[in-house]
Image (spheres, grey):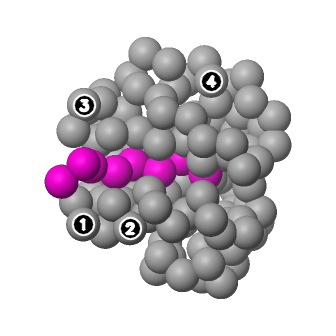
Amino acid sequence: MQEFDLNDSTADRFLLDSTGVSLVVFHSRTCANCKLARENLPKMNLPVERICWIDAGDNGGLVERYEVFHLPSMYVVKNAVFYGSVQATLAEWDIRRQVHLAQDSVPAELP
């Protein structure tokens, strides 16, 4: 699984150009759960082609547009279409299930 660090100026173009499923994860360097996510998500067998990391502390524009309320926050983007948030614990089974459920929701434009 590929990993990318995105920011306010690169995220939109990257997500619009990417095919397949992207898991967009907002995190912070000072958040303990975020550190666990950053360490463990790449090791999980998730139904995504890539994880896109966005540092919430440095990218206020994206935080506002995605309406990030807690960290880490995860969102599904598939073929440039936004499928919403992933409300899951940091357990592989839960994230896998929620990614699939998100793709069954009504798609929207990227925030």
Marks 2/4: CA distance?
A: 25 Å
Nearest to N terminus: mark 2 or mark 3: 2
> Residue 26, percent across and down?
39, 48
Numbered disc total: 4
Dot 3: few (<14), some (14–19), or many (≥20) neighbours within 10 Å?
few
Residue plotted at (41% across, 39% down):
54
Marks 2/3: CA distance?
A: 19 Å
Which contiguous range is marked in magenta? Answer: 23-30
Nearest to N terminus: mark 3 or mark 4: 4
Q: Is residue 89 above or below residue 32?
A: below
**Callout 4: helix, strand or loop?**
helix
Q: Nearer the viewer, mark 1 or mark 3?
A: 1
Instruction: Find residue 58 and name its label.
Output: 3
Marks 1/4: CA distance?
A: 27 Å
Nearest to N terminus: mark 1 or mark 3: 1
The residue wearing badge 2 is 36
Dot 1: few (<14), some (14–19), or many (≥20) neighbours within 10 Å?
few
> Residue 88, percent across and down?
50, 76
Nearest to N terminus: mark 1 or mark 4: 4
Marks 3/4: CA distance?
A: 18 Å
Given contact means CB atoms under 8 Å apart, are the residues at marks 3 and 4 in contact?
no
Q: Nearer the viewer, mark 2 or mark 3?
A: 2
